[in-house]
Amino acid sequence: MARFSTSTRSAATVSAEPDAVWATLTDPDEIARLTPFLQRVTEHGEHWVWEMTRVPVLGKSFSFSFTERMTFDEPHRIEFAHDPDAALAEESAGVEGWYALQPRSGGTHLETSMTISVDLPFPALTRPAVNTAMKGVVTLMGQRFSQNLLNHLGARSL
């Protein structure tokens, strides 16, 4: 078992008002509905438990559940940090990151950054291949989430 990580960062300006974007990003049910491979997000106060469906990595599939401490600075910033101390069971995955929202003429500038880390039953020797596979899955998830978010908001990229 080895620990693998990948990071992503993206930004876009969308034709939706900041309040609508904020409401979506702070709704665990909407986040789960809009995010590929995400089965459910359960809110427990300042912690959200994220449950992933089977995620493909190098011909195998893995399910993950991880606990994030959510910090909200309405309406500008959402931060999330893996907080396994709050979990009821040992977790093999976690995410660290943030969303930043800024009003723009006719919409909202949305920026996000996150690092995803998982323990997988692959030898450390396979790190380059596993990291590449993880990056591909995270990129696909980001693209689909972005399109789903735009559709949900009835918005477009500016």
Image: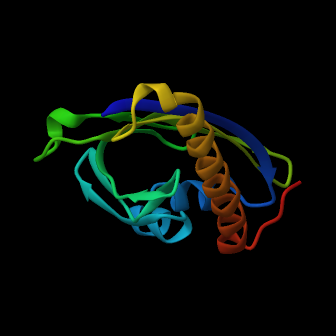
Residue 126 vs 44, above or below: the answer is above
Please state the total of marks drawn on the protein image.
0
From what the image shows, is residue 81 above or below residue 25? above
Judged left or right of residue 63, residue 31 is right
| Of 95 and 133, the residue lying toward us | 133
* Quadrant that contains the N terminus: top left
Q: Residue 130 vs residue 2: left or right?
A: right
Residue 106 picture quarter: bottom right
Q: Is residue 149 left or right of residue 22?
A: right
Q: On the picture, is 31 further left or further right than 154?
A: left
Q: Residue 112 at what x, y percent from top left?
A: 62, 39
Residue extending farthest right: 158
Q: Residue at x 16, y 43 (%)?
A: 87
18, above or below 129, in the image: below
Image coordinates for residue 56, horizontal then vertical, percent: 50, 58
Residue 31 placed where, x, y %? 48, 62
Residue drawn at x 49%, y 42% is 74
Q: Identify the residue at image location x=51%, y=29%.
A: 127
Report which quarter residue 145 is drawn in: bottom right
Residue at 86 percent of width and 48 percent of height: 105
Q: Which part of the image, by quadrant, shows the C terminus? A: bottom right
Task: Judge by depth and name the residue closer to the eye, 128 or 83.
Answer: 128
Relative image position of residue 22 (x, y in whole percent): 56, 54
Q: Nearer the viewer, residue 134 or 129?
A: 129
